[in-house]
Image (cartoon, rainbow, N blue to C red):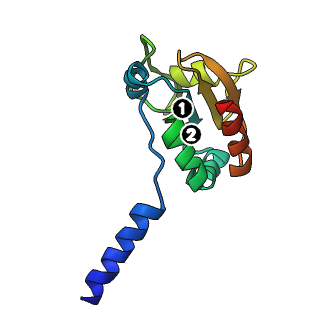
Amino acid sequence: MKKLFLIIIFFGITSSGFSQLKSKSFEEVDHLQQIQKRKTIVFIHTNWCQFCQRMKSTTFKNQEIIEKLNSDFYFVDFNAEDKKDVSFNNRVFKYKPSGNNVGVHELALELGTMNNQIVYPVLCVLNEKNEIILQYNNYLSPKDFKVILEKLEE
């Protein structure tokens, strides 16, 4: 009986107290924009980027940020080295190999290139028409990310 009670308490706390960040695919965003217009926030990262991993473990674990992203934006968590073709905004983007097990996705280049280069992590914000309205390529602390979210809602 004690074990059952503890399990119920555990699931009650985890399901009500902590929400998880809901990431969408680009294809889902295309479809959802037809139903409800929202800005899209794209987090472009790699597995080897230390600052990307730090943002994942701090900024994107912050409950205020999670709730704001889930309720007011579409969020896309995109690995720049993903090898799958992506259909987005009436185009198909592909992975571009540049050597042995090295390359970058065309969509990461399209959304993340600033000053003719891509530096990770990249935060790219798209308006309701999927046009780039903001690009930022650096680590963002939860505090700094909240400021950006507030400005985007104005």
Q: Amino acid at mark 2?
A: Thr
- The picture places residue 126, in percent across and down from the top left corner, at 58, 23
The residue wearing badge 1 is 80
**152 sits to left or right of 38:** right
Q: In the image shown, does 81 or 129 lie closer to the viewer?
A: 129
Image quarter of the C terminus: top right
Task: Decide if residue 139 is in sight here.
Answer: no
Q: Residue at x 52, y 19 (%)?
A: 106
Q: Quadrant of the N terminus?
A: bottom left
- Left or right of residue 2, residue 133 in this image: right
| Residue 62, placed above or below residue 39 | below
* Mark found first going from the N terminus, 1 or 2: 2
Regarding residue 110, the answer to whether it shows in the image is yes
For residue 149, what is the image quadrant? top right
Asked if the residues shown at circle 1 and circle 2 are in contact, with their CB atoms under 8 angstroms apart, the answer is: yes
Task: Report which quarter residue 69 is drawn in.
Answer: top right
**Quadrant of the image occupied by residue 16:** bottom left
Indicate the position of residue 150 as horizontal and vertical percent values: 69, 38
Q: Nearer the viewer, residue 46 or 154?
A: 154
